[in-house]
Image (cartoon, rainbow, N blue to C red):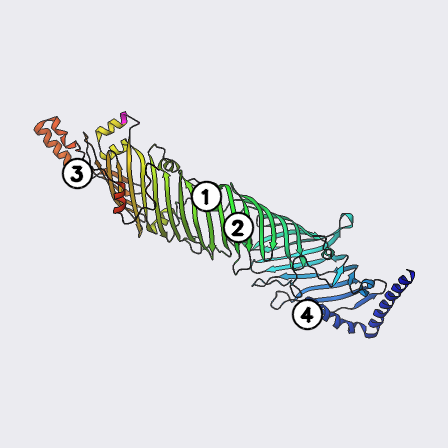
């Protein structure tokens, strides 16, 4: 054993003396060029060594190299990728004899590292072949201990308008463990950014059994984030596995991350597990809140496409539509510039309880966003005990935003529907309908409809109506007094049909019929949405004999803010004249004869009215048996 130790010691001494003799014979200038060439081949970057070389001979000799410069990629912001004032390397000669480079200690003094992405998104920090996969490390050598003194790192990404500078230092912690700390500041999207990051010592890179840990925080423009976890391949910044938490006052601040401008939204709080799978970023166990709304799910950001794309699914127990930027707009506002959209999306969305001006439940939809064109298909939800099946398309590249809507209403309960709209009454029925229109957009609901082209069709069956309303519509004093005396008086609704056509800002009502067991009401007319005016007429046709009836068509004219409802003068004026003449000839009894409605209205079959229209009903007409 002693002989072996003597031989090994002799070899180490001979190697050390041999290295000393080589340096003495050829000098530093003779070593500088080959060493710089070797570093260039390993990193793929032109390297220059500008300072002198010092050598301390021992069983583990120490070499000091000063003035190291690694050049950057062509077109980079900085000429140099990295520079080090002094690099000290300690070499284990015994391992070198075995064909392995083992460096007991490496220290860098005043290192500077310039990281950046090109306008095309190409990073400059991938060295060598760039083919390292997550979990691999450079296998040419091993570093047992690495020390960084007074380091500096800069980063620049023109696509994110992100630029910062950080100070880097390594210091010991408990149990002889060392950590690397970075503290920096800069700008992103014009806002100030500050961050702190703590990682494992750089020597951990050569210990595959130990994860390279990351922990840090970032504050920027009202956004606060924290993260903790590890990275598998720090050399190429791949294989992230982090627990992440985000909060802020405006979700629009995350535009550099999401690629979608979400302005005017309430404060938010997000947390989840972020991992990197190849070129994709995956967020699992995502939970959070946005205003009063909650949501959870899983999303993945795919970055291999020309435009990044979000895919995944999200669900919410309580979703307030105003929290995602959908407000009931009635007043015109100046049109903002089109919102930039740098990412696409393909998401499944669900909402159990949805709060809107018209509340509904059980929302299910698939969101498809491609180059700023948004489409929700299908858009399914429950409303007024019925089902709505719709398709909604919007072009977010333009303001006002063009909108296309196709919607089918299936068995909506009119009583609950009217209650959701703020009308408390007992009238009811089952509504089936269809809406199809395209609008070039508008800054209010009225302006949106004024720019619409399309049609709508509605059918109501299996309901009841307040007989007082029908009596007033007929100007029938007898039935009005009866309805007032018997407050629970109801008449059966056999069918109600309404059709609407939108063109050039005009809504045309045709056909319109309400058919009850006692009265049929027909009508029509138009609504000018641009002038905000009305011109509608309705005519009752009683089916039974009625005393004291001044039956006449009703005419509604005026504006949205000021309109009047009055009987059409012709028919009613004729009845008044006839009553006056009979009163003179035959007395008071004869005077009421013209107001006795003979009941010539006919029962109307609902299906007949549907067939008479140009369109067809969107679904089978609900029957009483259903």
Q: CA distance from mark 2 to mark 3?
A: 65 Å
Q: Earlier in the sequence, mark 4 or mark 1?
A: 4
Q: Earlier in the sequence, mark 3 or mark 1?
A: 1
Q: Which mark is residue 571?
A: 3
For the stretch drawn in magenta, the main secondary structure is: loop
Residue at horizontal 85 percent and vertical 70 percent from the top: 18
Label 2 SS: strand
Q: CA distance from mark 4 to mark 2?
A: 44 Å
Instruction: Name the residue tied to disc 4.
Output: 46
Q: Which mark is residue 363?
A: 1
Q: Which mark is residue 312?
A: 2
Residue at horizontal 77 percent and vertical 66 percent from the top: 65
Q: Which residues are magenta?
A: 484-488
Q: CA distance from mark 1 to mark 2?
A: 16 Å
Q: Position of residue 422 (x, y in %)?
A: 38, 36
Quarter where residue 588 is shown: top left
Number of other residues with Cα within 10 Å of mark 3, as a class: few under 14, some 14 to 19, many 20 or more: few
Task: Report if the CB atoms under discs 2 and 3 are less than 8 Å apart.
Answer: no
Q: Earlier in the sequence, mark 1 or mark 2?
A: 2
Q: Quadrant of the C terminus?
A: top left
């Amino acid at each position: 054993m002693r002989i072996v130790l003597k031989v090994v010691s002799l070899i180490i001494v001979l190697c050390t003396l041999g290295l000393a003799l080589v340096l003495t014979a050829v000098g530093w200038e003779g070593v500088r060029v080959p060493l710089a060439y070797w570093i260039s081949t390993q990193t793929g970057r032109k390297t220059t060594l500008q300072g002198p070389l010092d050598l301390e001979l021992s069983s583990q000799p120490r070499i000091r190299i000063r003035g190291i410069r690694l050049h950057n990629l062509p077109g980079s912001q900085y000429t140099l990728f990295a520079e080090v004032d002094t690099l000290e390397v300690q070499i284990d000669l015994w391992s070198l004899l075995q064909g392995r480079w083992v460096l007991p200690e490496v220290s860098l003094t005043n290192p500077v590292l310039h990281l950046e992405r090109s306008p095309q998104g190409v990073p400059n920090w991938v060295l060598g072949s760039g083919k390292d996969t997550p979990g691999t490390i450079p296998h040419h050598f091993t570093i047992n201990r690495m020390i960084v003194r007074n380091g500096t790192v800069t980063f620049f990404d023109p696509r994110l308008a992100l630029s910062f500078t950080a100070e880097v230092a390594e210091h010991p912690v408990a149990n002889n463990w060392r950590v690397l700390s970075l503290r920096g500041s800069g700008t992103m999207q014009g806002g100030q950014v500050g961050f702190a990051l703590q990682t494992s010592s750089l020597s951990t890179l050569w210990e595959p059994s130990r994860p390279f840990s990351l922990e840090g925080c970032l504050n920027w423009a009202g956004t606060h984030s924290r993260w903790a976890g590890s990275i598998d391949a720090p050399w190429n910044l791949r294989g992230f596995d982090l627990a992440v938490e985000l909060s802020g006052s405006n979700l629009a601040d995350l535009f550099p991350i999401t690629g979608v401008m979400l302005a005017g939204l309430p404060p938010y709080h997000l947390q989840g597990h972020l991992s990197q799978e190849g070129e994709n970023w995956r967020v699992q166990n995502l939970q959070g809140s946005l205003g009063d709304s909650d949501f959870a799910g899983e999303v993945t950001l795919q970055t291999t496409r020309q435009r990044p794309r979000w895919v995944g699914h999200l669900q919410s127990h309580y979703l307030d539509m105003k929290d995602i930027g959908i407000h009931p707009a009635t007043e015109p506002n100046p049109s903002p510039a089109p919102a930039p959209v740098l990412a696409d999306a393909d998401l499944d969305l669900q909402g159990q309880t949805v709060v809107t001006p018209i509340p509904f439940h059980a929302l299910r939809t698939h969101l498809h966003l491609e180059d700023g064109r948004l489409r929700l298909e299908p858009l399914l939800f429950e409303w007024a005990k019925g089902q709505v099946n719709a398709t909604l398309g919007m072009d977010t590249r333009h303001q006002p935003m063009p909108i296309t809507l196709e919607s089918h209403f299936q068995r909506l309960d009119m009583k609950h529907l009217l209650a959701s709209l703020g009308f408390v009454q007992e009238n009811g029925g089952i509504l089936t309908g269809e809406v199809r229109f395209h609008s070039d957009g508008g800054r209010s609901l009225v302006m949106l409809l004024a720019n619409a082209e399309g049609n709508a069709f509605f059918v109501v069956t299996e309901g009841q109506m307040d007989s007082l309303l029908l009596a007033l519509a007929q100007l029938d004093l007898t039935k009005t007094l009866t309805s007032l005396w018997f407050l629970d008086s109801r008449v059966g609704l056999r069918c109600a049909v309404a059709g609407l056509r939108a063109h050039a800002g005009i809504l045309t009502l045709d056909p319109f019929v309400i058919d009850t067991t006692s009265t049929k009401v027909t009508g029509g007319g138009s609504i000018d949405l641009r002038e905000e005016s009305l011109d509608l007429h309705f005519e009752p046709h009683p089916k039974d004999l009625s005393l004291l009836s001044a039956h006449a068509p009703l005419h509604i004219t005026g504006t949205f803010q000021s309109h009047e409802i009055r009987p059409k003068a012709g028919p009613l004026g004729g009845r008044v004249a006839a009553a006056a003449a009979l009163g003179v000839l035959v007395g008071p009894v004869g005077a009421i004869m013209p107001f006795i409605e003979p009941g010539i209205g006919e029962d109307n079959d609902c299906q007949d009215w549907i067939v008479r229209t140009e369109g067809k009903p969107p679904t089978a007409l609900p029957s009483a048996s259903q």
